Structures are given as C-alpha cells and as structure tokens.
Image (tube, rainbow, N blue to C red):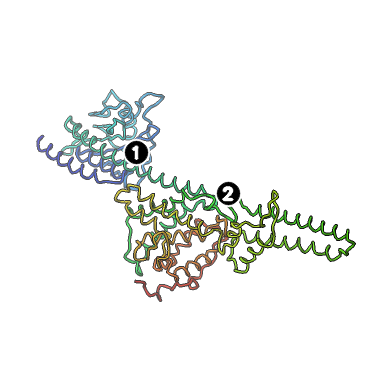
Amino acid sequence: MTNKFSDSALQHLINVGVKLSTEQDTTKLLENILLSAKQLSNADGGTIYSITEKNTLKFETLFNDTLNMYMGGTSSVPIPFPEIPMFVKGAPNANALVAYAAATDQVINISDAYESGNYDMSAARNMDEKTGYRTKSVLTIPMKNHEQELIGVIQLLNAQQDDQIIDFTPELETIIRSLTSMAAVALTNRQLIDGMEELFQSLTRLIARAIDAKSPYTGGHCNRVPELTMLIAEAVCFTNTGPLADFNMDETEKHELGVAGWLHDCGKIVTPEYVMDKSSKLETIFDRIALVECRIELAISEIKNKHQQQIIDELKQGKDITNLESKLPELIQELEDDRLFLCAANIGGEFMKPEDQQRVKDIANKYDVTINGIKQPLLTGNEVCNLEIAKGTLLPEEREIINHHMVITIEMLESLPFPKHLRNVTEYAGGHHEKMDGTGYPKGLKRHEMSVPARMMAIADIFEALTASDRPYKSAKMLSECLKIMGFMRLDQHIDPDLFDVFIDEEVYLQYAQQFLAEEQIDTIDKTKIPGYVLPKNRKQTA
C-alpha cells in the first residue's frame, strides 16, 4: 500500500509540477497549489495565504468539502475574513495557528485541534461553533522561496481515508512539504516575472510622463494615446462586419499594443524644448516679438527725433511747416499698424496669404534702426523667415527636428531586447506618423506594409492631437470638426479607411470624448456628414 501510494503521489507531483510551471496567473497558481495539496492528502478542507508587506496573512483561496465552501481564488466569492497579523506586540501571534507557524517558521502537525495543549486553537473552535464543523487533524506549512523568504502558508484540515478522519502522517507531511517546495519555486518565478513586468510597465509610464512633463503644451498626450489606441483595438475586436470582422487580438497581443502606445513618442525625450514648445513663430527660448516691438519703438523715437530736427531746420529757414507737422502722425500710425500686423502674424494660427508674407519683407526693408551706432533693418533675416511661415509656427528645418523624433523612437526601441511577446512593439510604435499612401514618415510606408495595430495607433495619435485643448498654436476643436478633418484624411488615404469606419461605427470617438474632452467640445455628430463615411448597409468593403 505504501509503495502504491508513493507511486501515485509521485505521478501527481510530476503532473502538478508541469501545471504549476505553465500557469501565468498568480491567483490561479495559488489556488492550484492548494488544490494539489488537498488532493494529495485527501484533506476535507484547506486554505492558502499570501504574505503582505505589513507581515499579515491574507486569505487567498479557501476550500471545505463538508461545508460546500469555496471562496477566493477564481470563485468570484470574496473571503470575508480579515488579514491575520503574524506578530502581536513584536512576538509571534500565538492566537492564530497559521500566523504562529509563519512567524516561527515551523511546520505544525496536529492530530486533534481540540486536544492539543501546545497551541491556542480557540479560533478554530469558535469557527466550528458558528459553522457546525469539527476541526480535527491540521497541517500547517510555511512556504519559502530560494532566498528563504516566507511567501505564503498552506493549512490543510482533516485528512481522510475510507470516510474516516486520520492524522497527517509523516509520509503525507513529507509529500505536502515536497509539493510546497516545488510550488514555492513556481510561485517565486511567477512573482519575479510579474515584478519585472510591473517594473517594465512602470518604466514605460515613467518615460511617457517625463515626455509630457517636458512640454507644458503636450502634457497628457503620451497618456491619452495608449488609452485611445486600446479603445480602438477593443472596437475592432468587437466588430463582426466588414473587412475587419475576422480580426482579433488576445490579451497578450493587446498588452503588446498597450506597451507600444506608452512608448510611441519616447524619441521626443531628445527633442529640444525650444522646438517642441514653439508656440509662436519668433519663439526660441523666449518670444522674440518683444525685440521686434522694442525696435519699432526705437524706430518711432528715431522718426520723431528726425521729424523734430527737420522742423527746426525748416523754421530756421523761415519755411512753412504746416504740411510737415501733419506727416508725423501718419508715419507713427503706419508703424503702429505694422506692429499689430507682425504681432498677429507671429501667432501662426491661420494660413498666411502670399500678400501677407510679402508685407513682412516690405516692413523689413522699409525701416531701419540704429543700435550701438550701427544701422540695421527692423527685422533680421531669421525673423523674416519665421514670420512668413505659411502654416503653423515651425520652419522646415524645425519640422524636420520634430519629425526626427520618430527615427529616435525606432532606434531606441530597436536597441531594447524585447522578449518574444513584445517583439512587435517597435513596429507598432514606429508607424503612427506613416500614411496609407506612403507620404508619411519616417519610412514612407504604405498601408499594406503596416500591421493593423500600427494603423490603429496612427488614428489614435491624430485624433488625440486634433481634440487636444493644450496646444499653444490652436484652440480646442469641436468633436464634429475633428471627425470632419479625419474624414478628409480618410479620403486622401492618410488613415486606414476600414479602421476609421469602425472608429465611427462603434462610436469610439464618443467613448474617448466622454473621458478626455471638455463638455463644451462634445457636440452632436451626424455620421452622414462625415466626409468619406458611408453607413454600413450601403458600404462597399475595402480590400
């Protein structure tokens, strides 16, 4: 009988070892450890505890066959019992057997809980009174990792044989201790993996927060894009019509996309602030429009001085100065008008017409001022180049610096030794500025050269930027206006048409808006007026 039992137990341990080594969920892992110990010992009940940072025992899973009780673990039934402190006033907690075993690092094997004089079993007897149960044999085993640190405790109740309650024999105790040792290795590995994953997740968010904090104008962008990306991913997985009806992502793939979302702009960490935060055309470390205004003031003063000197000279010659006096206000007003024009041009909020660009050049050539005895134009060559920017606030070379963040992003991500389940992070994160027609950057990829998740991220990045209220060069747009712009981008083959259709069909835009947009930005959306969008029943599917 002993040999037969040992063979059976050995096979059970082998099977358990395989199962424990493949389980990725810590909660299920703890539950499986308890179930295996319960099956090996044929125990009627059992509980497994984890150790908290406060040195308390937390109930993880509880089984009791007689009481038909299954709580915690994957049962969805919460365990109502409070955590048990391992120490009371610095001494091992003798009022709870499981706490005492953990605190003193000893295996406790009791034949009869009611007759044991070595340990305080009043808690067990009180619970029995409430439930009508009879606790007899008890086996409590602390679980320790490879560094001899306590990571959990197993407690088994009432071993059984032939429908009779028996003691946990030395052989049973040895088998269960072998199981807990093996389980401790599996649990430690899982905790180490989970710890590394948590650390990596924290680092990705740390990088995102650092980039957002670097610029007061894009704060939150790196946090919002992954949120929106995952909303799109869930919607695409949910849809059951159209070209994307068969597309699906499991939890591992969604996790991979989420990581890419958090890291999609990591290259911006090297982008200079004076370019990233350029809120006006003349801004560098400060807005140079103030220097231009100072020169205009200086020009006005010089005109006044020159005019006064001319009046004095005319008076000395006995000439009529009436016409001369009337010209000064006109000259000053002209300069004031030019000042207002340049200040408005500096904002860069709207497209600058060619005639306005020419006016900038004319102003630069029309006036000069004397500074430190040297005559110089009212506007420097660099100021003229900046002030005549047709759209936005960036010069072409500055836009190249901004765009270069994608090259840096890809280089940074390619340098990381991503594990197999994250091998697509670089491709997903590195494609959010690509366009379906190949006119995007940095690689000029076309639609068929990009994965579906990478195309999702492109839509998320654009929509976040359009709806953002924290940009220096534009006011917050209404939701309908953002969708209109994206509709035209769909028609121009800049974004994936099938993904955009799902974005509208499943109202992902509204889910995002309700979480992140100001209430006044959310207006009524008429889907039939979104450029390029066709209602599903009339839609021709895109190949």
Visible residue check, residue 138: no
- Closest to the observer, 473 or 90: 473
Q: Position of residue 498 (x, y in %)?
A: 39, 68
Q: How many marks?
A: 2
Q: Where is residue 197 in the image (x, y as percent from the top left)?
A: 35, 44
Give the vertical position of 140 relative to 68 (above or below).
above
Mark 1 or 2, nearer chain start: 1
Quarter of the figure with the C terminus = bottom left
| Residue at which label 1 appears | 59
Q: Where is residue 499 in the image (x, y as percent from the top left)?
A: 40, 65
Q: Which of marks 1 and 2 is in front?
A: 2
- Residue at 24%, 28% (x, y): give it: 110
Visible residue check, residue 337: yes
**Amino acid type indicated by mark 1:** Phe
| Residue at which label 2 appears | 285
- Residue at 54%, 58% (x, y): give it: 394
**Amino acid type indicated by mark 2:** Ile
